[in-house]
Amino acid sequence: MKTLFKNAKILTMEDNQPIFEGSLLVDGNKIAYLGKELPKGSFDQVIDCEGNVLMPGFKNAHAHSAMTFTRSIADDLELHDWLYSCIFPMEAKLEAEDQYILSKVAILEYLTSGITACFDMYYNPQEMARAAIDMGFRTVLLGTVTRYRESVEEMKKAYKEINGQNPLVTYVLGFHAEYTATEEILIELAKAAHELKSPIFTHNSETPAEVEGCKQRHNGLTPTEYMEKLGLFDYGGGGFHCVAVSDHDLEIFKKRNLSVITCPGSNSK
């Protein structure tokens, strides 16, 4: 299918490339033309942008899409109390089908904001993959093992089932956080990362209390230092939030070429 977008102010996001008026042609799932002239030929669909901006979509780099049902619930609580007193008990009531529907609600919201892809961390990834495929939305799904839910074996199964299923959806390994995992889980996860050659992502150092708790549990090591010791980052990955990281933590991030995904909106509450 060929779709022509015409009369657009085009912002490519390339360095030193100003906005220009022109057209964009999509052939199937690829951009076939981008320029100031109107391409010749026949098209299945023509969209007149009427002078509006046409640009690459935004990417939500850290999402829990199915958690749309918890929006604005207990926003006044500290992270630990919010999770254990409010969120975890509510999540325990969810069925897999609920997550499919809630993920579709989130995708509709993403699209209204110009978000065309997300990095989604939640349970029952097969349901989230189904929602993304049904909505035509690009998603990278992330494992979320804890001592309470999911397992490394389940994540390995999801990795093999989801990757290659549809070009819109991929899956990588992850875990919720150091404080919701056991060392046995993390050692098993490091082995899985080596087996699958997969990066690992997790919530990391979101609060000073989280960091201090980790130091008490693991002989003075910060979450990043502890994960590095266990070999979790041998194939890369990254951390979400990273509010209370140390200079040495940042050295590890640089050494392993890890991503830092900050979430200032949530952490400013």
Image (cartoon, rainbow, N blue to C red):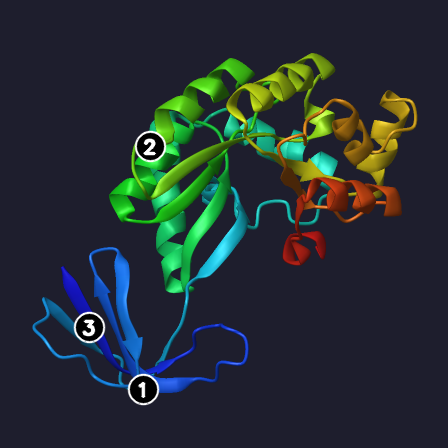
Return the disc, 1 or 2, that comes first in the chain's sequence: 1
Residue nearest the observer in this picture, 33 or 131: 33
On screen, residue 206 versus residue 14, left or right, reads right
Whether residue 122 is situated above or below residue 46 in the rendered picture = above
Q: Residue at x 58, y 45 (%)?
A: 73
Whether residue 147 is situated above or below residue 144 in the rendered picture = above
**Circle 3 sits on which residue?**
4
Q: State which quarter of the image contains the C terminus.
A: bottom right
Outermost residue to the left:
42
Residue nearest the observer in this picture, 175 or 104: 175
Tell me the element at label 3. Answer: strand
Report whether residue 268 is seen. Answer: yes
Which mark, residue 51? 1
Nearest-to-viewer mark from 1 and 2? 2
Whether residue 213 is situated above or below residue 245 in the rendered picture = above
Q: Residue at x 64, y 58 (%)?
A: 265
Tell me the element at label 1. Answer: loop
Q: State which quarter of the image contains the N terminus.
A: bottom left
Return the disc, 2 or 3, that comes first in the chain's sequence: 3
Tell me the element at label 2. Answer: loop
Q: Amino acid at mark 3?
A: Leu
**Circle 2 sits on which residue?**
164
Q: Position of residue 172 (x, y in %)?
A: 50, 33
Q: Tag 3: Cα neighbours inside 10 Å, few (<14), some, or many (≥20)?
A: many
Q: Amino acid at mark 2?
A: Gly
Q: Quadrant of residue 50?
A: bottom left
